[in-house]
Image (cartoon, grey):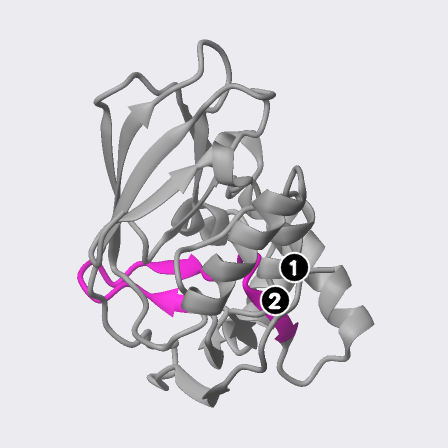
Amino acid sequence: GSRYLLELDSKEGYAASSWHTDVTFVDAYPKGSILRAITIPEAGGDTLWANGETAYEGLPEPLRQLVNNLWATHSNLYDYAAILSGAKDDAARERLSQYRNVFASTVYETEHPVVRVHPVSGQRSLLVGHFVKQFVGLNQAESSALFQILQDHITKPENVVRWRWRAGDVAFWDNQSTQHRAVSDFGLQRRTLRRATVNGEVPVAIDGRRSRIVRKEKATQYEPA
């Protein structure tokens, strides 16, 4: 890795195997992401992408009316616990702890509209993913139930494409209207990819309101469990 490239290496215990949109815990999160395959397992380790625009178009009308005016709080602390719990040994957990202290050394919480209007096409898409902490105005139990409904809808097979990597492959996608995840089915085989992102702009809701950071503060030192 470097200042501009993030290396995603399975030897560090890292596999982004939950559905997410990159870096949504900030307001102007990346508009595009690029992955280059370096080391690929003989079998497994594919990446899935889900289309948030077709997912929105396919929502039942009552659900569409609900999400049109709904907002969600995204946090960079909310997803790292799941990543850390997947570490294979103490050394991997320590490396992931260091990773978290770099990428979550500042705690962010940002409110985004659940329905984002694309800045170029004007299309509406669902903005959810596993950086979501809670829906604004709903309690945790209500948020969890609605989150699962929306995620299940977004990730239906008809909204998803699957890519089988070969070394040297490059994937470039619109991070403003998609989610993605790695398939963690490659056991102890090595899987290394490098990621770069393209600066984005602050999302806009259907009613014209813009996403906003509601919390930004220095994190307390993290100690692995």
Residue 210 drawn at (x, y percent): 35, 84
- For the magenta stretch, what is the residue range? 116-134
Asked if the magenta segment contains residue 15, the reply would be no
Residue 61 drawn at (x, y percent): 59, 59
Q: Disc 1 vs disc 2: Cβ atoms closer than 8 Å?
A: yes
Check disc 2 and give the amino acid type: Tyr
Front one among 38 and 118: 38
Disc 1 or disc 2, which is closer to the eye? 1
Asked if the magenta segment contains residue 133, the reply would be yes
Residue on which the image places disc 1: 81
Identify the mark at residue 199; answer none if there is no mark: none
Q: Is residue 73 left or right of residue 37?
A: right
Count of numbered circles in the view: 2
Q: Which residue lies furthest to the right in this view?
A: 141
Tell me the SS state at disc 2: loop
Residue on which the image places disc 2: 78
Q: Residue furthest top?
A: 42
Check disc 1 and give the amino acid type: Ala
What distance separates the C-alpha of mark 1 from that of mark 2? 7 Å
Residue 62 vertical placement versus 162 (above, below) = below
- Point 58% across, 44% down: residue: 92
Q: Is residue 78 left or right of residue 112?
A: right
Residue 45 drawn at (x, y percent): 48, 24
